Structure formats: C-alpha cells, structure tokens
Amino acid sequence: MTRGLLATLVALLLLAAGPDRAPAQADDAEPPQLSAAAAYAVEASTGEVVVAQEQDERRAIASTTKLMTALIVREEASLDDTFTAAGYRAAPIESQIGLQPGEEMTVRDLLRALLLESANDAAVTLAEGVAGSEDAFVEQMNARARELGMESTTFANAVGLDDPDNLSTARDLVTLALAVREDAFLRETAGMEEATLESGERTRVVTTRNELVQETELVTGLKTGRTQAAGYVLVGSGTRDGVTVISAVLGAPSEAARQEDTLGLLRYGLGLFERVTAVREADVVARVPLAYREGMTIPLAADDTARHTVREGEDLRREVTGVPEEVDGPLERGVQLGTLVVRSGDEVVARVPLVTTRAVEEAGVALRVGDLLSRPMTILLLALLAVCSVPLFVLRRRALRRQRQRA
C-alpha cells in the first residue's frame, strides 16, 4: 500500500463520522395562511426564500422606514455623538419621546427611542444631526437603498409618514432588515423589550412596540409600523438553534393579524432549516505519513469551526484536498498542509485550513539509513547484489590460485 493511499484512507475514516447537527424541532409543517396584502420571508444566512406573496408590490411602509434611518445613522455617526433636538412638532397621535428645544441626547439613546418607541422626534433629530436637514438625509436614504439593490423603494422622509413617494415592497424590506442586522448594536436594540435613556434633560424609559418580542423568545425584532395608508406593517426576525428567519408583512388588517402572520412565517421558516456543524476547530481530519519513519504520521486538525444552515434532512459534504503524500521536518506546529472543503449541494460553503497539531523534527541520518534499509526494494537490491557477488568471488579466488601456481 502506498503512503499516499494510506493518507487518503485515514482521512476518509476520520470523515466518516460526518457533520454534527443541531437538534431539529417540530414546527408548523405547512405555510401559514396570511391576511396581509404582501409578505416575504427568507432564511438569513443563505437568503433561501421561505414564503413569497405579492412580495414586489409597492406599498406604504409606515414606521418600518425607520430601519433605513437607523442604518444610515450607524454608518455616519458614533453612538457617543450628541445631537441637539430638532424643532420637530409632532402631532398628538404621533409616537414621540417629548424632546424639548435645545435638549441634547446621545445617538445611542436616540436610536433606542427610534427603534423601540418609534419616536418621530428622535428620527428627525437623528436625520438633521447626520445630514444637516431631513431633505439631505432622505437623499442619503435613497442612495443607500440603491446600493442595497432595493429597486422598488423610494423614501420621502425619515419618519415613515404617509407620502406618495415613501413606498417599498416586502422583498426590499427584508433586504433592508438583513443589512440592519449586520450591525450588532441595531440587532441588539431591536430585540430589547425596553431601554432606559440616560442622556437628555431627564431619564426616560422606552418600551418596544413589537409585542411579539415581549411574548416569545423566538422573536428577536425588528420594527413595527402603522398608518392609514399602510395599514399594519411588521418586519420581523426569529432565531432558534442558530437559524434565523427574516420576514416582512405589509398591509395587514389589524395589529393582531400582523402578529399572527409574522409569527406564522417565522415558525414555518425555522421549521424548514437546521444548523449543521461540518467540522469543529481542533478536530483531527487527516493524518500525513512522516518520511523515513515507517508507520508514523502527523495529525492535521481543522483550524476553524465551519457551520452552515441547510434544509432539514440535507447533508453537507466534506472533502480533504491538498494533503501531501508524506512530509519531513522541520515543521512547526500550526503549519497548513491541506484544506477541508465543505459543500452544500454543488456550492462550496467553507474552506477550512488543516494544520499540523505538533512540531515535526527533521529525520536524522540514522532514521534515513534505517528507513532505506527497511524498504523492500532496498532488500531486493541487496539480495541481487549478494547473488551477483558470488560468481565474482569465485572468479577472484580462481585468479589468485593461478597466480600462486605460476609462482
């Protein structure tokens, strides 16, 4: 058996255990019946569609507009920056935190008021603080929407008040939500039940308007909205066992309906997927024979953990590539000698370096000679040499005998 074949067989045996799976949980088996006019849901890490219903219909989106407001602010300002309250006069029915003229508040607190309390005065204060005016800020919102590929979205204000030009789609809102969730502060804030605002002229406590966050641990955000033109809107997110689903429902007939639709979408989506661990950091995946040391190998371990979300019941495939047939030292610990390629279907979802688990010294002269002498080919050559040497020895003795006789 060649050493290359030996290394391959060892690697295959190590891979035979297969990837680890998160325990699956039963959930809604059928897509939910929705009352919303439009809806869209995807698995967050892969973008795989869960449900699509009138997902490209342009509609009013109410305060879910504030997701873009929050995203722009996080990209343009520091959480510790302080902005002076805008001269925004909110109508009595509008959500607000009652900012007073000249009052100063940190961006951190303004964002929490924006996402939890859906405060319109906080939204305009943030817009003016970043861009100098709400109109200039709206230009940034529309530019960012184009960068994100939100082709059916236009913004007219930073608040979400009804306007013929403040429109989006369920698909575009999910795209926006995915971008928002990449920011750790926004992701954490959207999942909070309440927050205390310490800056400003007085301490304030804001509470989320997303009752699903308060009612179930499954729901982790993101933003509600409601106006006359938009009806009831909710961009939601749910996470369980490492799987996250993002949803958007637009034009629901009531608050209860948008919550039921959102929860149905999230539960259904989470039931379709599972998080699979293809390999864990430090798992030994292959072994490489050591030159001049018959039967000795150096273990190669994964240098990172690789996880991926797949449809429930689907498998990840693993393949070891680039591993040499044998190695000699000197080698330090942690040297890459191959790669573990992880595939989901035909797509490569991870490439994990395989590294030496210990140092390897260079083989000395004694080891090299001993290895050479132990090889079958060497033994055969020595045997042939010995056989060929017998006639030569006999001829040599005859020649010496003749020389003596002549003398």
Image: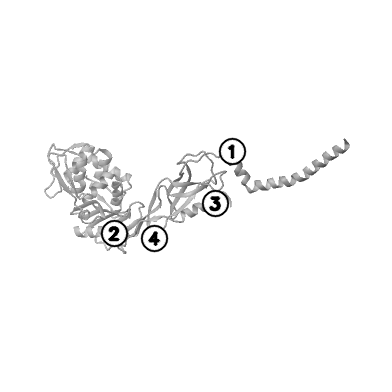
Residue 277 rendering spot, x and y as whole percentages: 39, 53
Position of residue 362 relative to residue 283, above or below, is above
Q: Which of marks 1 and 2 is nearer the N terminus?
A: 2
**In the image, 385: left or right of 157?**
right
Q: Earlier in the sequence, mark 1 or mark 4?
A: 4
Give the amino acid type for the residue marked by disc 1 in the picture. Val
Element on which disc 4 rests = loop
Task: State the image quarter where residue 382 is shown.
Answer: top right
**Of labels 4 and 2, the one closer to you:** 4
Q: Which of 100 and 310 is in front in this view?
A: 310
Q: Which of 223 and 139 is in front in this view?
A: 223
Give the amino acid type for the residue marked by disc 4 in the picture. Gly
User: Going 12% across and 41% down the picture, which residue do you hit?
Assistant: 202
Residue 169 rendering spot, x and y as whole percentages: 28, 53
Residue 55 rendering spot, x and y as whole percentages: 30, 56
Element on which disc 3 rests = helix
Name the residue beneath numbered marker 1: 365
Name the residue beneath numbered marker 3: 6
Name the residue beneath numbered marker 4: 313
Q: How far apart are marks 1 and 4 (CA)?
A: 54 Å
Q: Distance between the residues labelled 4 and 2?
A: 17 Å
Residue that lies at the very extreme toward the right in this rendered image: 406
Element on which disc 1 rests = helix
User: Going 66% across and 47% down the picture, which residue do you hit?
Assistant: 379
Give the amino acid type for the residue marked by disc 3 in the picture. Leu
